[in-house]
Image (cartoon, rainbow, N blue to C red):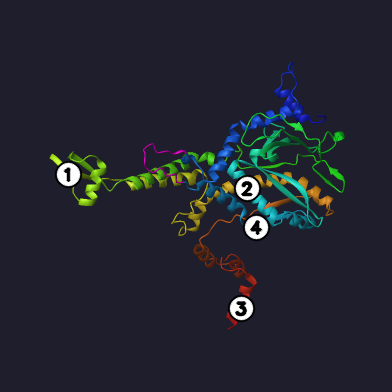
């Protein structure tokens, strides 16, 4: 594969020089197999299950026949992931550019659709540790080109890093399955795309039965590209002109430096909450109000005893026999205290806020700031990661703007200003505004939480003063 230095590097790393050289397709299959066998891949799949409210409590069994076996799930991970994404991205963010023309062009790029995708990228980064986006240029129904990004699931992409710090990408392998039919049989065909600075090469493997997983050797798909370019397609071609970039058209955002999913830090706590709640529910469902102790029972079996007790309000005994009853006791308060502690630990170690806390609504401004401090710091770090991803995406945005005839902005800069306002106690703010002696009325109105239009409020005050 001429010019594909990344594959050659992997080949030298994997193969014994004295042995037979592996083909590009075999190397590709081995890289994907190794990625799927790694701990990171397992954690990302597990993170998705926990986000979809399927934790380890699903493995719970009750070996006692005819007894309850509830599996109560709490969508804890989903709530915490969504809380971080909403705190950072729910409010509209502003795009500041170094010149007005660039700002106007970026306004078309960061439309409502792009903003929704950026929020989904943040959610994926928190949920699975890292998120990947592939920029591209799409053509609408009227032939109008537009910039867009495709969210690549992190479980479908093998990054090829240029450095040990994992700060520069030299290539990426995206793998996925497509469904094909052979007669009446539904099969899956493994496919792969190898992205480099030159563009993309596409590969495929023979179809296999759905659910079958084994080592796959890929073959180069010569239906794309041409032999002169080693069947490599450019990142984008506009008007017959191919664009080759200085960067691989794959942009990433990390949820944290270690690329660990959020559930990794709270998994055992979530499992314990679900498990203890389910076990307690089993006991409440199955426990009898009274336990009967029989002495010298004269009946045949326990079923007869229960029938006599229900139908005749009496039972037969012999000799000195009798019936005693014990009342079962279940300490629910101890269980609730234990669950309350686990809940508090989950919130603390996930750097989140317990919005279900009844005292939160009556807390002072200083107390609210303290409670939101961890969530705010966590989201500030996420905002920095998003800025880095957009910095890497800028090259592809500028190529699109130049190709679309909107100008060359390669020397300009832009940044995103996120709107992450902490909740405040309005009463405290109003009291503070009223106490601001020596500050103009306009400044106090601008900071008053009930005033949305300062000019209109000034006119009203002037009218009241005249009256």
User: Dots 4 and 1: beta carbons under 8 Å?
Assistant: no
Q: CA distance from mark 4 to mark 2?
A: 14 Å
Q: Position of residue 348 (x, y in %)?
A: 49, 45
Asked which quadrant contains residue 47, the reply is top right
In this rendering, the answer to whether 103 lies above or below 465 is above
Q: Position of residue 447 (x, y in %)?
A: 59, 64
Q: Is residue 409 magenta?
A: no
In 3D space, how far apart are the residues under numbered discs 1 and 2 (Cα atoms)? 71 Å
Q: Secondary structure at mark 4?
A: loop
Residue 122's label in the rendered image is 2
The numbered mark, 4 or 2, whose residue comes first in the sequence reads: 4
Q: How dense is the environment of label 4, judged by Cα within 10 Å: few (below 14), some, or many (20 and up)?
A: few
| Residue topped by disc 3 | 462
How far apart are the two marked residues, 4 and 1, measured between alpha carbons?
77 Å
Name the N-terminal-most of marks 1 and 3.
Answer: 1
Residue reaching furthest to the front: 184
Q: Nearer the viewer, residue 221 or 238?
A: 221
Q: Are marks 1 and 2 in contact (CB under 8 Å)?
A: no
Q: Quadrant of the C terminus?
A: bottom right
What residue is disc 1 on? 316
Frontmost of labels 3 and 4 is 4
Predominant secondary structure, magenta span: loop
Q: Position of residue 80 (x, y in %)?
A: 53, 48
Q: Helix, strand, or loop for circle 2? A: helix
Q: Nearer the viewer, residue 80 or 63?
A: 63
Q: Position of residue 215 (x, y in %)?
A: 66, 28
Q: Is residue 111 left or right of residue 255?
A: right
Instruction: Please indicate whether residue 462 sits to the left or right of residue 249 in the image.
Output: left
Q: Residue extending furthest left?
A: 319
Q: CA distance from mark 2 to mark 3?
A: 47 Å
């Amino acid at each position: 594969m001429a010019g594909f230095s990344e594959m050659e590097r992997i080949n030298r790393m994997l193969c014994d020089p004295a042995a037979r050289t592996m083909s590009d397709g075999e190397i590709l299959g081995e890289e994907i197999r190794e990625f799927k066998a790694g701990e990171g891949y397992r954690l990302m799949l597990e993170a998705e299950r926990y986000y979809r409210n399927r934790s380890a409590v699903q493995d719970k069994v009750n070996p006692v026949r005819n007894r309850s076996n509830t599996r109560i799930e709490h969508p804890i991970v989903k709530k915490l992931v969504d809380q971080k994404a909403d705190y950072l991205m729910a409010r509209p963010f502003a795009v500041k550019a170094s010149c007005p023309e660039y700002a106007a062009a970026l306004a078309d790029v960061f439309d409502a659709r792009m903003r929704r995708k950026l929020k989904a990228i943040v959610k994926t980064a928190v949920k699975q540790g890292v998120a990947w986006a592939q920029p591209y240029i799409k053509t609408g129904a009227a032939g109008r080109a537009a910039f867009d990004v495709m969210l690549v699931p992190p479980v479908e992409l093998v990054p090829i890093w240029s450095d040990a710090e994992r700060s520069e990408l030299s290539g990426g392998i995206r793998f996925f399955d497509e469904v094909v039919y052979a007669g009446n049989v539904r099969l899956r065909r493994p496919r792969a795309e190898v992205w480099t600075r030159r563009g993309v090469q596409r590969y495929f493997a023979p179809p296999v039965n759905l659910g079958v997983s084994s080592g796959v050797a890929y073959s180069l798909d010569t239906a794309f590209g041409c032999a002169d370019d080693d069947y490599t397609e450019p990142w984008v071609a506009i008007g017959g002109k191919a664009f080759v970039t200085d960067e691989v058209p794959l942009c990433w955002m990390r949820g944290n430096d270690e690329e660990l999913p959020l559930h990794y830090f709270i998994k055992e706590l979530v499992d314990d909450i679900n498990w203890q709640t389910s076990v307690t529910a089993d006991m409440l469902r199955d426990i009898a109000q009274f336990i009967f102790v029989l002495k010298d029972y004269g009946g045949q079996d326990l079923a007869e005893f229960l029938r006599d007790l229900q139908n005749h309000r009496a039972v037969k005994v012999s000799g000195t026999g009798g019936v005693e009853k014990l009342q079962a006791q279940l300490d629910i308060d101890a269980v609730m205290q234990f669950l309350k502690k686990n809940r508090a630990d989950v919130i603390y170690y996930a750097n989140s806020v317990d919005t279900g806390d009844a005292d939160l609504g009556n807390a002072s401004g200083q107390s609210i700031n303290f409670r939101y401090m961890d969530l705010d710091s966590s989201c500030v770090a996420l905002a920095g990661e998003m800025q880095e991803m957009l910095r890497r995406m800028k090259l592809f945005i500028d190529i699109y703007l130049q190709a679309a005839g909107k100008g060359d902005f390669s020397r300009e800069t832009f940044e995103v200003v996120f709107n992450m306002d902490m909740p405040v106690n309005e009463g405290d703010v109003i009291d503070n505004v009223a106490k601001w002696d020596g500050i103009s009325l306009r400044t106090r109105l601008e900071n008053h939480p009930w005033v949305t239009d300062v000019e209109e409020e000034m006119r009203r005050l002037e009218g009241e003063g005249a009256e």
